[in-house]
Image: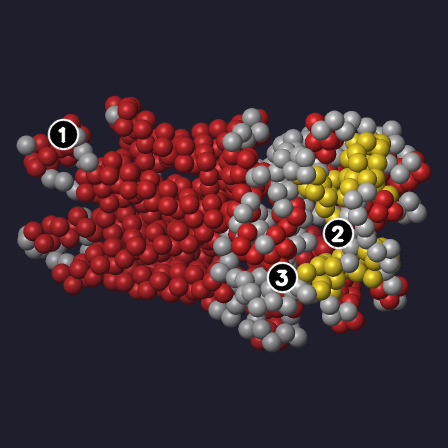
Amino acid sequence: MKINHYLIGFAVSSLFRRGTKSLFVLFIFTALIFLLSSILFISNSIKEELNLTLDSLPQIIVQKLQAGRQTNIELKRVNKLLEFQGVQSAVPRIWGYYYFEKAGVNFSLVGIDAYDKQYKNSFANIVKNVNFDALEKTSSMVVGQGVKKALSENYYKNYFNFIKPDGDFIKVPIASTFSSKTSLESNDIILMPRSLVLEIFGMDKTKATDIVLSVANPEEIPTIAKKIKNLYPDTRVITKSDLKVSYQNIFDYKSGMFLALFVISAFTFFMIIYDKASGLSSEEKKEIGILKALGWKIDDILQEKFYEAFIISFVAFISAIILSLFFVYTLEAPILKEIFIGYSRLKPSFDLPFILDVQTIFLLFFLTIPLYLAAIIIPSWRVASMDADEVMR
Amino acid sequence: MFLTPETIAILILDCIFIVFAFFAFVISINIVKKWDLNSTSSLQYSLEKKAILAATIIKYIFVLKLPLFMFFVFTADKISGVITGAMCAAGVVNSVEFGLWLFVFKIINLFVFGFWIALHVKDMQDEKLSLTKLKFSIFLVAFLLLIIEIAYEISFFASLDVDKIVSCCGTLFSVASASSFSVIFMIPNNIIITIFYATFFLYLVSFFLKSELFFFFSNLVFFIVSIISLILFFCTYIYELPTHHCPFCFLQKEYHYVGYLLYVTLFIGTFSGISGSILSLLKPHHSKSYYKVSLFFNTLYTAIITAYPVVFYIKNGVWL
Amino acid sequence: MYSSSNLHEQTKNDFVKTVGLPDLAISNGANFIRHRSLSDTFSLFSNGPELLEYFPSTFTYNYSQNYKNIPSRIELE
């Protein structure tokens, strides 16, 4: 198939001649692609943000289930787990949620051990001014930016009174905040010494929330996970690859929902285009009559119609992508990002990593342009195959 | 059901294809039954118009099928991150029994639809439209193939199971496995290399003889032998691993997406050879340019694929 | 295409290493949304069985699909 430059020129000028009609279709199509691509861009960026830190996650997490719910796991299991071949370390963790009623938010409290020297360097990188040991000595806490804001709005500038299960207060001073670079991860997190978390939650000292294992050889992880499951049938063993799958799936199910809605709107759009392409003004009919009288074949007219459609859909596609890139990464997706944040009162600053991969562009392409072209096939064939004498009359 | 944005996109396009191909199918039946160029009836007149619609629809489907095939491989690659045990598209495709058949049908359909377009272009150049009846009878078959492919594709996405542990390409493409591939792994390396270069030589001979029938068969054989030798021998040099025989992994970023280059050159080379020689069998005055196109791309493919072991040998001084 | 200017990969990795918990602090309307990778079908029920889709964010995020470790009669697609 040769590309005929004169036909393209004719198609362009024909689009301009029917300015308002083309503009209307262009506008709707651009808006449709814009919405779809914005949502895909936001979700891709969130996925990218998650995958960025995937390697730093624990290799195996062991949780205990009782009556179908997660409960605290006995500390004596740690030693049993350490006996497995290949297990390098097994660390019991204490973490959980603290509901701060006045602001109506959930904080995530994480306990940290002073004797875990491995954390010392990374700790220095994420919290400035505060020494790891000082945290333990003064029994203070490090909070995320969002927590800090929620607390200071309720006049807790330098400390916070946690309410224990028995009704007593524990006053914990705020030592510092996490670096704002990590706000997407750290926004609602409070880090404090283990003993403090145990006290706030009123937990048994012989128990932990879950146990984290590290394995020397990553190849052995599935085997070790299976062995743990055999030894303690009441546990749930979550490996890093499970977490990875979960990260991969984070939107696939639900952005499928978005797409289900998109299918409906796309079908509506299909109808609009079909309708617009079949309803011809007398002037357009006359034009086709003249072209036919001049010796244009059905194929030529069809081809010209295709060029028109392709130009419109391509212009809409490109401008929608540029618009949504600007909208998502420069304006930080106002309104649309509320879909992803939901109810949470602790809104993190939304600086998403810029990511644009070929596959997303292809996906958007396949979801939009073929639809448009399909909508015009039959109407333009009908137009093109009209007889010259019939339309000229 | 495994619904990701990618699979939904593919399924939507499949639906569009079915609806439009069905229109074309109905038109084709009418044409095959009632086409008579000498008649001056209004039926013949409307059939001639409808033939253009059907041809437009088939062109539309083919033009989309080409990039969609790559998109499918891309998607399967992406899903491999979710399915336990799968490391690339091979694992995903083989996680259901008919995965291989889906692929075979996809490739056959690309050839058939591509050939149809070539036939159509040839037909439109002919004032007497003598090939019209033939090309629409071919479409009747192509429509069935398309329906089978789409049925396979839909049930493929429907039966993907996130929880099932699948075997990865490392075990699929090896002698020890019981997969459908394992039979051809009995062939030793030196024989497969000999066969590959022998078919290429045969192909060159057929090029110089300029006999259509011979050229057609040599292209067909070259295509099949190329794929087999790629899996058995050449891809181990792409991965620089003697045990890795996967025809999908080199589509990934780690190997600079070289697979797309290899498959596209092989496809253009053999496709232009096969369709060109059929067309000249049908129409003796067909232009001979397809010989050169075919020769260029097939030689390019052979050159690239030969370069891998040679470069490896120069670098390391040993064969794998 | 990736841009590295606003990634701060090292700092973020250090943070995750220290805290050891997955998922982003984007949505914390409920705990099965906050650490969704660690939650399961039944985390939802702790808030009351009738509250399946109570938070707006649960329309966007789901609990984790790592249900294979949990014995349950709920068959998920």
Q: Which one is in front in this view, the residue at disc 3 or the one at disc 1?
A: 3
Q: Is residue A341 left or right of residue B41?
A: right
Q: Which one is in front in this view, the residue at disc 2 or the one at disc 3?
A: 3
Mark 3 near mark 1, Cβ–Cβ under 8 Å?
A: no
The answer to whether B100 is drawn above or below residue B45 in the figure is below
Looking at the picture, do discs 2 and 3 lie on one chain? no
Q: Where does the image place residue A314, in percent across and percent down from the top left?
A: 40, 34
Kind of residue at disc 3: Tyr
Image quarter in which the N terminus of chain A is found: top left
Task: Tell me the quarter of the picture where residue B162 sits.
Answer: bottom right
Tell me the SS state at disc 3: helix
Packing grade of label 1 (10 A; few <14, some 14-19, many >=20) is few
Tell me the SS state at disc 2: helix
Name the residue beneath numbered marker 2: B315
Q: In the displayed orientation, state which residue is furthest to the front.
A: A167
Task: Tell me the quarter of the picture where residue B196 sits.
Answer: bottom right
Packing grade of label 3 (10 A; few <14, some 14-19, many >=20) is many
Tell me the SS state at disc 1: helix
Q: In this view, does C44 lie to the left or right of A147?
A: left
Kind of residue at disc 2: Lys
Query: At 28% across and 47% down in the image, what residue appears?
Result: B56
Q: Can residue C36 be seen in this view?
A: yes
Name the residue beneath numbered marker 3: C67
Name the residue beneath numbered marker 1: A282
Q: In this view, does A377 lie to the left or right of B90?
A: left
